[in-house]
Amino acid sequence: NIAEIHFHNQLSEDNFPTMAQEVIAGLSSRPKYCSPKYLYDQKGSELFEKICELPEYYPTRTEEAILRQAMPEIAELAGKDATLVELGSGASRKVRLLLESLSVRCYLGVDISRDFLVSSTRRLAADYPWLEVHAACADFTRGVALPEGISPKRLVTFFPGSSIGNFTPEAAERFLISLRRCLPTGSGLLVGVDLLKDHAILESAYNDADGITAEFNLNLLDRLRKELGFDIEREGFSHRAFFNERQSRIEMHLDSRDFQVLSLNTKSIRFRKGESIHTENSYKYSIPGFQRLAGRAGFSSRRVWFDDDGLFSIHYLIS
Ligand code: AVI
C-alpha cells in the first residue's frame, strides 16, 4: 500500500563536500569531535530505533506515557485544523499519538536520513488517508524553513525525544530563536526534554547490556569509511559514555584503542592511544532550567508535564 507524500529536498543535492569538510574539521581539532547528526545514516537510524526499545533507555517509553496522559490537554492547546511539523521525525511513531487525538490537517516530517524519512512518512500517509503528508529531508541544525505549499494559520511543532539535548544550551537557544522566526506568532512548540537524575540511571541508558548504543556509536566509523573513503576500522575504537556533572550532559566518545594514523587522500589524522572522537552530547535539564532557556529564546511556557519518577518532561511553549 504505497501512499503519496509531498517530498521536499532541503539538503544540497550533493551533501558530500559539506559532510567531508565538517568531519575533517572536527577530526583535525583538539579535542577531536564529530557532529552527532552524522550518526544517522540508514543503519544509524535503524539502530537508534532499537535503542528506543531497550530496557535501559527510559526516555522513549517515558515520553510516550506522558504524551498519552497529556493528550486531551495538548489537543486543547493545539486547537483545530493545525499543521503539525515534526523535527527529527525518524520512524514517526510518537507522532501517531498526536495524529489520533489532535485535529491535524497537514503533517510535515523533517529528518536528515532520507530513505528512512520517505518510508516512515509513506507509512503515515497510508495509515491516515485524510492527512496531507509532507516530508522534508533537511539538516535542521542549520535552521528550519517551511517548504513552499505549507502556509499554516495554526502551527504546532513537535520536537520529541530530547533531541534538543543534543545541542549545547547556547546552540539550543540559537536554534529556538531561529525556529521562532519561521513560525507564525502564537505557534505551539511541543518539546520533549530529558531531566537530570541519578547518574547511574543516566549512564546505564547510554551503556546498555546488549551493546546497541556501542553499535550505534561505532557505526559512524563505517560511515566515514564507506561514504568519505577514510581508512578507518571500527576495531580500532571502543565506545565510551559517561555523565559529565559539571556540564550536566552525557558524553559519548569513540576511544582509539592504540596509537594510529588515519588517512583520507593526502590528509592524515593521528590518534594517541586512548584519544577520542567526541561524537555526542546529551544535555539533561531541570524543568525551570529548560524554561529559562526557552524564555531567553522568546518562548513562553504554557504547560509542562512529567512522569511520577521525574525522569522526563514535555513542554508546551508558545512563540
Ligand atoms: C536522539 N537523541 C536525543 C538521543 C539521546 O539520548 O541523546 C541519541 C542517543 N544517543 C545514544 N543513545 C541515544
Image (spheres, grey):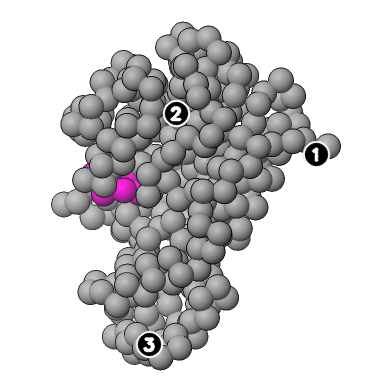
Q: Is residue 59 magenta?
A: no
**Residue position for label 3:** 267
Residue at 34% over, 85% down: 269
Residues at marks 2 and 1 touching, judged by CB atoms closer than 8 Å: no
- Find residue 82 and report its horizontal and vertical position in percent: 52, 17
* Magenta highlight range: 165-169
Q: Are marks 2 and 3 in contact (CB under 8 Å)?
A: no
Element class at badge 3? strand
Furthest residue in direction right, as rendered: 1
Q: Say whether residue 34 is left or right of residue 15.
A: left
Q: CA distance from mark 2 to mark 1?
A: 26 Å
Measured from the top left, where is residue 248 in percent x and y? 22, 47
Image quadrant holding the C terminus, namely top left
What percent of the width, then of the height, locates residue 140? 42, 46
Residue at image position (40%, 91%) is: 266
- Count of numbered circles in the view: 3
Can the viewer see residue 53 in this picture?
A: no
Q: Tell me the CA gap for discs 1 and 3.
A: 45 Å
Residue at the spot of label 2:
157
- Amino acid carrying mark 3 in the image: Lys
Q: Earlier in the sequence, mark 2 or mark 1?
A: 1
Rendered residue at 52%/37% (across/down): 147
Residue 262's disc is none
Residue 287 in the image, given as x and y percentages of width and height: 25, 29
Type of amino acid at the residue the image marks with label 2: Thr
Q: Quadrant of residue 241?
A: bottom left
Name which quarter of the figure residue 128 lies in: top right
Relative placement, left or right, of 168 versus 137 is: left
Question: Would you name the residue on which mark 1 appears?
Answer: 2
Residue 222, compared with residue 3, is above or below; it is below
